[in-house]
């Protein structure tokens, strides 16, 4: 795979290679953060010095379907030894779904010093780089966060409905079977309770995985991404895009690709996604 | 009814409410995973032993022992298949050596009792599918035992 700086990305500094991470393992200004779907993976071994951020217990509110508020984010960042100047480098399993999801949540609180490790955990493993079960003890910090700012990055159902009525751009990043309504969930995953199958009217079906190289999970070049999103699927970078999937994890991956790699200025993630839309009463659905 | 060894293990795990403590125990089981020996199966493993809907690419075998009990064997092909390896070790240690009638009574709901908070969305179905695959192999042995000729079989 080509070097990140040679791929033509709009914001190449949002992505780092496994080589870069290996060279910064002892860099005190960098905090490696592993975020996975499989909660046993971090305990079984992780990149030396990496801390664990769990999407369910650390990033989600434990009562409402929402994200943590400012106090929760401050406590999390304090626990993992972050300051507003610390560079968060996120990686994880499932081709970085949850790393991108965590990156996205970090942006809700304005922690812009954040990067994703290209290829995620599987690339690090395939390269036979070191893993350790030792949990680092970074000294706790005092982290002052701003109030969560959803509007630039997050879309809610009423906004999506208005977006649909205005015939604005929507990207459905789920599998073609989910898009068509043949399935209510992705293959091999539990049905998380959507009563209706199909997609939000007007959405283009661009499965998230088309943005990566399947052999190592790295992102495709800007030229390849532009062909996929702009030429083949007619997304206009000048207009707003809302991406969605099932609960917002796969669409975080696409949100990252559109916003940071292609430089679309206005991209939001609809984290309510199909588990909300597929249950809403009287909203339009296409099959 | 849950076989005694498995019930004992579930009782041992029950007090561990802290996800990280439970994760350490489960990873310890995963580290003790022993792959199916070459005498039973070699790569490429046959598709009919593959656990359906398991993204860790798990395989399972049940080998008849002369005393009428079964010995379970597993393979987990995904390098990230930590949960599958943990469950395989637990199933082998608590169910191998039991007659198929006892093994067939173990249902997929034990997965939730073993993994609790450490069960992930995608993994849950795959792990339950592993238990179901073991259950199916045991059930297949039950009618076979009535007419078996005593020759060792594996399935």
Image: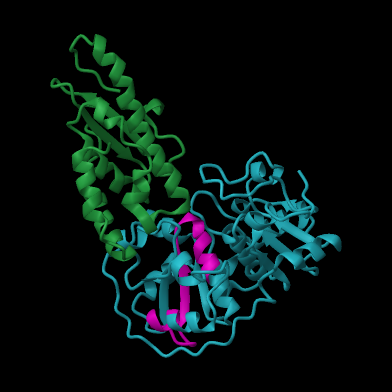
Chain colours: A cyan, B green
Taking the spot 64% from the left edge, 80% from the top edge, the residue there is A149
Q: Return the x and y of residue A101 as percentages of the image width and height.
A: 55, 66
The residue nearer to you, when weighing B58 against B12, is: B12
Q: Is residue A45 visible?
A: no
Q: Is residue A216 visible?
A: yes
As drawn, is A283 to the left or to the right of A213?
right
As for residue A108 lying within the magenta part, the answer is: no
Q: Quadrant of the C terminus of chain A?
A: top right
Taking the spot 25% from the left edge, 12% from the top edge, the residue there is B146
Q: Return the x and y of residue A21 as percentages of the image width and height.
A: 41, 71
Q: Return the x and y of residue B93 as percentages of the image width and height.
A: 20, 41
Which residue is situated farthest in the front direction here?
Answer: B1
The residue nearer to you, when weighing A242 against B25, is: B25
Taking the spot 41% from the left edge, 56% from the top edge, the residue there is A38
Specify the segment rendered in magenta. Answer: A76-102
Which residue is situated farthest in the left direction here?
Answer: B67
Q: Return the x and y of residue A142 as percentages of the image width and height.
A: 42, 90
The residue nearer to you, when weighing A66 against A222, is: A66
The quarter of the picture where residue A112 lies is: bottom right
As drawn, is A233 to the left or to the right of B107?
right
The quarter of the picture where residue A54 lies is: bottom left
In this rendering, the answer to whether A4 lies above or below B117 is: below
């Amino acid at each position: 795979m080509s070097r990140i700086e040679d791929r033509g990305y709009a914001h190449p500094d949002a992505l780092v290679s496994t080589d870069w991470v290996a060279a910064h393992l002892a860099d005190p200004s960098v905090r490696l953060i592993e975020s996975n779907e499989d909660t046993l993976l971090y305990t079984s071994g992780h990149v030396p010095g990496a801390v664990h951020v769990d999407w369910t217990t650390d990033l989600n509110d434990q009562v409402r379907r929402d994200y943590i508020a400012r106090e929760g984010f401050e406590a999390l960042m304090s626990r993992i030894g972050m300051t507003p100047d610390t560079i968060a480098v996120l990686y994880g399993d499932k081709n970085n779904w949850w790393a991108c999801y965590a990156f996205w949540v970090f942006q809700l609180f304005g922690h812009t010093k954040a990067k994703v490790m290209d290829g995620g955990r599987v690339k690090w493993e395939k390269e036979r780089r070191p893993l350790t079960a030792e949990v680092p003890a970074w000294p706790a910090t005092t982290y002052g966060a701003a109030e969560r700012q959803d509007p630039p990055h997050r879309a809610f159902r009423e906004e999506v409905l208005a977006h649909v009525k205005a015939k604005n751009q929507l990207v459905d990043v789920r599998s073609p079977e989910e898009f068509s309504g043949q399935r209510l969930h992705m293959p091999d995953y539990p049905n998380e309770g959507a009563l209706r199958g199909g997609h939000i009217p007007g959405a283009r079906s661009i499965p998230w995985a088309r943005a990566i190289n399947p052999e190592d999970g790295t992102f495709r070049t800007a030229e390849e991404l532009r062909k996929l999103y702009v030429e083949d699927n007619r997304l206009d970078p000048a207009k707003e895009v809302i991406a969605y999937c099932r609960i917002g994890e796969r669409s975080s991956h696409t949100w990252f690709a559109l916003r940071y790699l292609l430089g679309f200025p206005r991209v939001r993630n609809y984290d309510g996604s199909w588990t909300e839309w597929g249950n809403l009463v009287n909203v339009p659905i296409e099959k | 009814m849950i076989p005694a060894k498995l019930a004992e293990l579930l009782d041992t795990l029950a007090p561990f409410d802290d996800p990280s403590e439970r994760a350490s125990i489960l990873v310890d089981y995963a580290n003790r995973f022993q792959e199916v020996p070459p005498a039973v199966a070699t790569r490429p493993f046959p598709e009919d032993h593959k656990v359906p809907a398991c993204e860790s690419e798990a395989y399972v075998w049940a080998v008849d022992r002369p005393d009428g009990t079964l010995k379970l064997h597993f393979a987990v092909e995904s390098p990230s298949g930590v949960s599958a390896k943990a469950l395989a070790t637990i199933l082998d240690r608590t169910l191998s050596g039991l007659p198929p009638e006892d093994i067939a009574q173990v249902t997929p709901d034990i997965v939730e009792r073993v993994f609790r908070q450490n069960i992930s969305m995608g993994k849950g179905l795959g792990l339950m599918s592993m238990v179901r695959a073991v259950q199916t192999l045991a059930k297949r042995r039950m009618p076979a035992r009535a007419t078996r000729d005593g020759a060792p079989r594996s399935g």
